[in-house]
Image: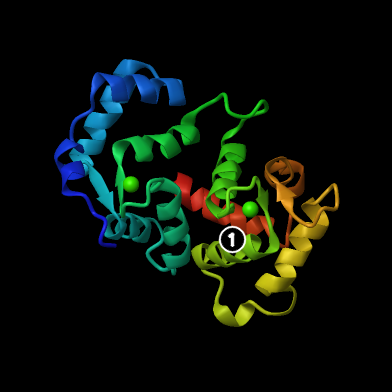
C-alpha cells in the first residue's frame, strides 16, 4: 500500500505517441480509435485513473441488489496489472478491447469472449488452467451476481458440489482442472440447468446496461 507513486498521477491523463503505438500493437485497434477511447475514458475519469471505489460503484449500478464484492475484487485485480491500486487507461483498454474484438478466438462470439474474460479473471495464478481452488470463488461470485440467496446454496447447489459438477462435465482430458478451451466451450454451457442459467442471467444483466 505504501508504494503509490505520485509521479504516475501527473502522466495519467496524457498518452504518448509511443504508448498509443504500443496499445495499437497489443489490441489491433487503430490509432484514432485508441485516441477516441482515451478521450471517452477521461470524460468519465478526469484523473485518468479508476480507483477501486469507482469500480465498485459502477458494478453496484449494474447489480444494485447484489453482493458484488468478491466479483469486483477479481475484476479489479484483472485490470490492475501492475498492482499499484489504480486502473490506468492502458490497463483499462487491455481488458475492455477484448469484449468487442473479433479475432481472439477462431469461432468468436460475444459469449465466448465473455467466458474467456471470466477465465482470465479467475485464473489467479495465471497458469492457463482453472483449478478447484479457483473455481470455487468463480461459482460464489456468479451466485452473488445472480442474487441466489445464501440458504439456497446447499446440496447440489453448494459451491463445492458445483465445482465437482463443473469438473465432471467440462474436464475432457481428466486432469482435474479446466483449460481455457474446455471452459469456454459453449456446448457445455448452453441449456445447462444446474450452472449455465446463473452464468447467462449475469451475462444478460451486463449486456442490458
Ligand atoms: Ca495499475
Ligand atoms: Ca490457475
User: Among all residues in the image, which is located at the extreme front?
Assistant: 3
**Residue at the image point whose x is 37% and y is 57% from the top:** 59
- The quarter of the rendered structure image containing the N terminus is bottom left
* Residue 89 screen position, x and y as percent: 30, 37
Q: Which residue is mark 1?
A: 138
The answer to whether residue 118 of the structure is visible from this angle is yes
103 displayed left or right of 171: left
Residue 115 in percent (x, y) is at: 60, 45
Q: Quadrant of residue 53?
A: bottom left
Q: Is mark 1 within 8 Å of ligand 2?
A: no
Q: Name the foreground residue: 194 vs 171.
A: 171
Packing grade of label 1 (10 A; few <14, some 14-19, many >=20) is many
Is residue 106 depicted above or below 42 in this figure? Answer: above
Q: Please name the residue shown 56% across and 79% down the image.
A: 150
Q: Is residue 2 left or right of residue 136?
A: left
Q: Going 19% across and 30% down the picture, which residue do you hit?
A: 14
Q: Visible in this render: residue 209?
A: no
Query: Observer-nearest residue: 100 or 11?
Result: 11
> With 178 as the anchor, is 122 left or right in this view?
left
Figure check: 98 above or below 54: above
Residue 49 coordinates in the image, percent (x, y): 24, 45
- The kind of secondary structure element at disc 1 is helix
Name, please, the residue furthest toward the bottom. 151
Residue 133 image-quadrant placement = bottom right
Q: Residue at x 66, y 25 (%)?
A: 106
Left or right: 12 with respect to 95?
A: left
Colour approach in the figure? rainbow
Along the line of sight, the residue nearer the viewer: 204 or 38: 38
Q: Where in the figure is residue 23, as x and y percent of width and height?
A: 38, 25
Q: Is residue 38 above or below residue 33?
A: below
Amino acid at each position: 500500500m505504501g508504494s503509490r507513486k505520485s509521479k504516475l498521477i501527473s502522466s495519467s491523463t496524457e498518452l504518448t505517441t509511443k504508448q498509443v503505438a504500443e496499445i495499437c500493437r497489443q489490441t489491433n485497434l487503430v490509432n484514432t480509435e485508441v485516441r477516441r477511447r482515451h478521450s471517452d475514458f477521461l470524460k468519465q475519469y478526469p484523473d485518468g485513473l479508476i480507483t477501486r471505489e469507482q469500480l465498485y460503484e459502477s458494478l453496484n449500478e449494474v447489480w444494485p441488489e447484489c453482493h458484488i464484492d468478491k466479483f469486483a475484487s477479481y475484476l479489479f485485480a484483472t485490470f490492475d496489472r501492475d498492482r499499484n491500486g489504480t486502473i490506468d487507461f492502458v490497463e483499462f483498454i487491455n481488458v475492455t478491447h477484448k469484449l468487442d474484438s473479433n479475432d481472439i478466438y477462431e469461432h468468436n462470439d460475444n459469449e465466448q469472449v465473455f467466458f474467456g474474460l471470466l477465465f482470465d479473471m479467475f485464473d489467479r495464478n495465471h497458469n492457463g488452467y482453472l483449478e478447484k481452488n479457483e473455481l470455487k470463488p468463480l461459482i460464489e461470485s456468479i451466485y452473488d451476481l445472480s442474487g441466489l440467496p445464501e440458504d439456497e446454496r446447499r446440496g447440489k447447489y453448494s459451491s463445492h458440489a458445483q465445482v465437482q459438477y463443473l469438473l465432471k462435465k467440462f474436464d475432457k482430458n481428466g486432469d482435474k482442472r479446466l483449460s481455457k478451451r474446455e471452459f469456454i466451450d459453449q456446448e457445455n454451457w448452453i441449456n445447462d440447468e444446474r450452472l449455465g442459467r446463473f452464468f447467462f442471467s449475469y451475462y444478460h444483466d451486463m449486456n442490458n446496461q
